[in-house]
Image (cartoon, rainbow, N blue to C red):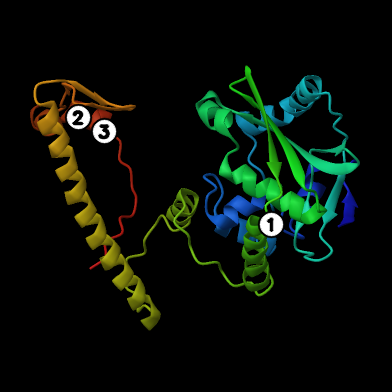
Amino acid sequence: MKILVKTGSLTREEWLKWRIKGIGGSDVSVIAGINKFRSVFQLWLEKTGQVMPEETENEFTHFGTVLEPVVKKEFMKRTGLKVRAKKVLLQSEEYPFMIADLDGVIYEDGEMCIFEAKTASAYKEQIWESGVPEEYILQVQHYMAVTGAKKTYIAALVGGNHFYYHEVYRDEELISLIIKMEKQFWEQNVLQKIEPCPDGSQATTDFLNQKYKKANGSTVELPEETLSLFRQYDEISEKLDELTVRKEAVSNQLKNYLRENEIGVVGDRKVTWKQVTTTYFDKKRLEKENKEVYEAYITKNQYRRLMVA
């Protein structure tokens, strides 16, 4: 690895501009299609210079930055290990498209380990209690690929009052997959400015729905290659229908075992079949009998519905 730039005196805007010169640790989950908040399209637009890189400032990201020193201090107190700041943007010499901005490093038994600090909501407590979320596994393996480090300590403050830390060891097989994935994205999509193939992530769904939220009413002739997508859509739809029927059959078998009972248990598994009361609002009747009130409270929401024929 080598130092790409020292970050200590960089402004936030300058730091973001340096990040487009390569793929960082937080970008890996986006390329892999498992990031819930960023689409591969957004990442591609930034890395190709079509849009300025930006990071959404919200309560989570704000307090994540504010609490990073707290997480680091608590980790040092609990482990006795010293975390050293490394205010540089690192670059892999073997794979120059791979860059890393580390929260800190630890020297343990003469070897450099990586330190990463995180904050998370209370909803993620069960995940952090048992291990490290997969998006962060990809992030730290990327860092170890860039630096050559064999181990990462990752610490998290969860829900504001639960502290966890885990050791993540270098995984050569996973690193090989990460390098292959990043290399393809960088060389084929970024350098050649070829739009990436859409993945199935919610972030990509939201991105496309927002970008093309208004239809112009026109008909377009699709390329011949899209016929394979139609076939895939049909095959997947048939499998989903079959699985839905099979799932319903299993549900009915469980109902037949429960009968009048509300809860059934076996081993460490539990099934419930509870009475549920729902309230139905008859909007058609309200529109017919009191149209003024109906129109005063309705809210129209426009969106595009995809239908394949």
Crowdedness near tag 2: few (<14), some (14–19) or many (≥20) residues, C-alpha within 10 Å: some
Between residue 217 and residue 308, name the one nearer to us.
308
x and y percent of residue 49 in the render?
70, 62
x and y percent of residue 53 in the render?
69, 52
Q: Is residue 149 left or right of residue 121?
A: right
In the rendered image, the quadrant that contains the N terminus is bottom right
In the rendered image, the quadrant that contains the C terminus is bottom left
Residue 298, numbered circle: 3
How many angstroms separate mark 2 from mark 3 (CA)? 6 Å
Which residue is drawn at the image coordinates 77% and 48% (left, top)? 150
Which residue is drawn at the image coordinates 33% and 43% (left, top)? 301
Tell me if residue 8 comes above or below residue 170 in the rendering: above
Q: Residue furthest front?
A: 267
How many angstroms separate mark 1 from mark 3 (CA)? 57 Å
Say which amino acid is labelled 1.
Answer: Glu
Crowdedness near tag 3: few (<14), some (14–19) or many (≥20) residues, C-alpha within 10 Å: few
Instruction: Determine if residue 206 is in view.
Output: yes
Say which amino acid is labelled 3.
Answer: Ile
Determine which residue is flagged by label 1.
172
Tell me if residue 85 comes above or below residue 144 in the rendering: above
Determine which residue is flagged by label 2.
294
Q: Are marks 2 and 3 in contact (CB under 8 Å)?
A: yes
Disc 3 on helix, strand or loop? loop
